[in-house]
Amino acid sequence: MADRRDDRRNRSGHSPQNFRMKHAMENATKSPNRHPARLLSVVLVDGALTAGGQYQRLTCYGAFEVDFVEGSPSFTSHHASTTENAPRAALLKDLGALSHDSHVVLGSSRAQHTFWDRGHILEAGLSYFYAMSELEVIEPSNLHLMGAPEMAMAELAKTFGLLICDKEDVLGQARAAGVRAQLVWLAYVASKLGPKETRNLFAAYQAWHAIEKARPLPF
């Protein structure tokens, strides 16, 4: 009886081995992911800041906004922080407005040197969900948790001339949040998109970054 069942399953092409082979072939022929039309890379810092023996809560976000306009990417960098309650609500509201209807790529503000450090990204996800739940209707179009190891982030930073910060203290993380959000986006592009689109986006980013570096410092 068992032999007849196995024979029927083999003839129908639905054996576990055939299923795995079919699934692998389908995945191999799929085209690479495309970059979302609107994407926001976010690094959120929200923790205790001790200065002079007094407790303060520091809330900060770095965000890198990528919008495609007529097929070309447009980049905007955001970096905001506060230690006051009232401005904190406004800061999170601004982050919510940026996140709404965007594909959010969420990175950790803390360095991830080992496998077990990947728990940082889960903490970052919970912090982001909690912060957004305090607002009214905020609905990103999608959410991706970026868990790139620190070696990969450091290599991207070196390639694009960015400073990378792996400090554990909240103030150090907050200062680096803006640049780290850009690195999170670069890691997303490198790991999720096809070679041609990756090259094009990296070239567009390099041009934007060169212009940003050439801007005069405000006084």
Image: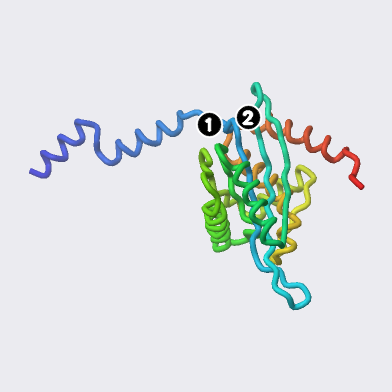
- 219 sits left or right of 105 in the view: right
* Label 2 crowd bin: few (<14), some (14–19), many (20+), radius 10 Å: some
Amino acid carrying mark 2 in the image: Glu
Q: Residue furthest bottom?
A: 53
Q: Residue furthest front?
A: 86
- 22 sits left or right of 68 in the view: left
- 141 sits left or right of 97 in the view: left
Q: Which quarter of the figure has residue 182? A: top right
Q: Residue furthest left?
A: 1
* Label 1 crowd bin: few (<14), some (14–19), many (20+), radius 10 Å: few
Disc 1 target residue? 32
Disc 2 target residue? 197
Q: Is residue 64 above or below residue 28?
A: below
Residues at marks 1 and 2 touching, judged by CB atoms closer than 8 Å: yes
- Residue 110: percent from left, percent from top: 65, 60
Q: Residue at x 72, y 62 (%)?
A: 83
- Residue 90: percent from left, percent from top: 66, 51
Q: Residue at x 92, y 47 (%)?
A: 219
Q: Which quarter of the figure has residue 22? A: top left
- 84 sits left or right of 34 in the view: right
Q: Is residue 107 above or below residue 52?
A: above
Q: Which quarter of the figure has residue 71? A: top right
**Tag 1 secondary structure:** loop
Amino acid carrying mark 1 in the image: Pro
- Residue 2: percent from left, percent from top: 11, 44
- Residue 161: percent from left, percent from top: 80, 45
Q: Residue at x 89, y 45 (%)?
A: 218
